Image (cartoon, coloured by chain):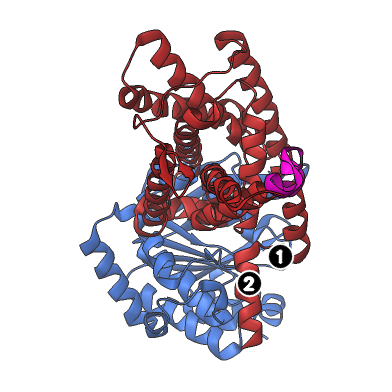
Chain colours: A red, B blue
Amino acid sequence: MIDAVQLVQNLVNGIGLGLIYGLVGIGFCVIYNASGIVNFAQGVFVMLGGMICATLLARFGLPIWLAAILTVPIVALIGVVMEVAVVRPMWTRGASIFAIILATLASQMLLEQVTLLTLGDQPRTFNSFTPGGPLMVGGVAVPYQLFWVLGCGALMVGGLWLFFTRTRMGRALRACSQNAEAASLLGIPVRRMMMLSFALSAALGAIAGILITPSQITAYNIGTPFGVNGFIAAIIGGFGSAGGAVAGGLLLGVLQALAIAFLGASFKNVAALSVLLVVLLVFPQGVFAGLKTLRASRR
Amino acid sequence: MTTPLLEIRDLSARYGHVHALKPTSITVAEGELVTVLGPNGAGKSTLLRAVTRLTPGPGTILFQGQDVSALPTHRLSELGIIMVQEGRGLFSEMTVRENLILGGYNAGGDAGELSARMERVFTLFPRLKERLDQTASLMSGGEQQMLAIGRALMAGPKLLMLDEPSLGLAPRVAAEILETLGELNREGLGILLVEQKAPLALRLAQRVYVLSLGRVVAELPSHEIKSHHDLARYYLH
């Protein structure tokens, strides 16, 4: 039987991982909010964030802050290239959303293979942003990196909320997802907005990748599991809400930690997919929107 | 001869193999309210979509004498060509305030200009001021149409094009909205109004085009429609 300290340790690990799922989920929401497209290459941005940052650190000996600052725009640029080369031509020719989503999945595979060929198949990692640690709390080890993930996650959620609700560009992005024709008629450059959403989403994925690499290592093929779990987090949160995605990610991370503690590590993905199935069956619009509707109907 | 506000020459549009708008020429003078009438499938909505390049097709579009045929949709708003779509085209999950602010997107974030335009909209549609924080989709049909027109006015139009603004509205509400359009026209705003059957729209209009099967089949001053028995029977009753 698992002891209490080990259980709390698993939960702390789950919270850290769940926050990362949430950050990946936010990336899904940004593109979905701007275009209605679910970008299945979102996980690859996480992988590229970690891999490029690790490469810059190892090959050029840059300090972590400089490597991170350089990595984010590089990955954002890859997001723009993906939008211009894959999504935009299909969008312009009136391809269905399903076809575009499938093309993003193909892009994920392509980018993984390009990474494999250029950076190799060896897993990479780098040191935590704050040396030392972990912080010991009653026998439970809380890595300093978790505080970085928490802080950056809170900044990203707050920043995105302000961006989407208080800025001209953020509102225009939301307008594009709700009615692209009407947005265009009001002077909003819809294509440019979609490009911006891919850049922003890729940048967010890169930040998640840089944050997670010190504790989870990275490799050319880690994009898919992070993408799948980020997607589940976004669905739990109601797809479209940044705060919902983070809450969904936390829930998923904690449930995975409990599954590992009580059922074994091999049940981690079973827990994630079971959660997804239950959410889709009970709250197809997301747990939080579903609970809100339930409360409203009881009044 | 003064330059028309809008001049369309031989504009046509297709949906796949369907030639929805055959080469069509119409004009709207500065400060004129022109109504386009026609039954379902006549090509009225396609005409507006072709002008705004949502459904681009061959032909020439001159706006205040400038050829705008090659411009993309979002650039037309900067020139002052604004369209209210059939079905209103609101950002339904956003509030009234957000819809109106987005209407003024081409003001480039100038808060003073946005505020002045919004006050003007509230003068015309006071109900929108009372509903500022309400989600657009939760409003009545009439209020949604007011919001759609208010949002279009936030863009500072020189030419306002409306696709069946009275569709699905109670007669009293439709009359109220069309009266407001008449007021805007009397202040000098050029309006191109598409309607199916609208005695009131005809009363407001100075000129009428009648479309059938994608072609203009009649062009006449609106007061003359009474003397055309077949048109009068179809569009005035």
Q: Which residue is mark 1?
A: A283
Tell me if residue B144 can be seen: yes
Q: Position of residue A118 (x, y in %)?
A: 56, 9
Label 2 or label 1, whichever comes before in sequence order: 1
Q: CA distance from mark 2 to mark 1?
A: 8 Å
> Label 2, on which residue?
A291
Residue A299 percent location from the top left of the image:
61, 88
Q: Secondary structure at mark 2?
A: helix
Main SS of the magenta part reads helix
Chain label for disc 2: A
Please state the chain letter of the residue tagged with numbered disc 1 in the rendered image.
Answer: A
Instruction: Say if A178 sits above or below A133 in the image.
Output: below
Which corner quadrant of the image does residue A224 belong to? top right
Q: Amino acid at mark 1?
A: Phe
Check if residue A271 falls in the magenta segment. yes
Which residue appears at 56% of the width and 68% of the height? Answer: B88
Residue shown at 58%/80% (left/top)? B141
Q: Is residue B155 left or right of residue A36?
A: left
Q: At numbered mark 1, what does the secondary structure look like: helix, strand or loop?
A: loop
Compared with B42, A138 (above or below) is: above
Q: Hey, what amino acid is under mark 2?
A: Leu
Do the residues under discs 2 and 1 have CB atoms within 8 angstroms? Answer: yes
Residue extent of the magenta highlight: A259-272
Report the residue at 70% width, 55% height from top. Answer: B214
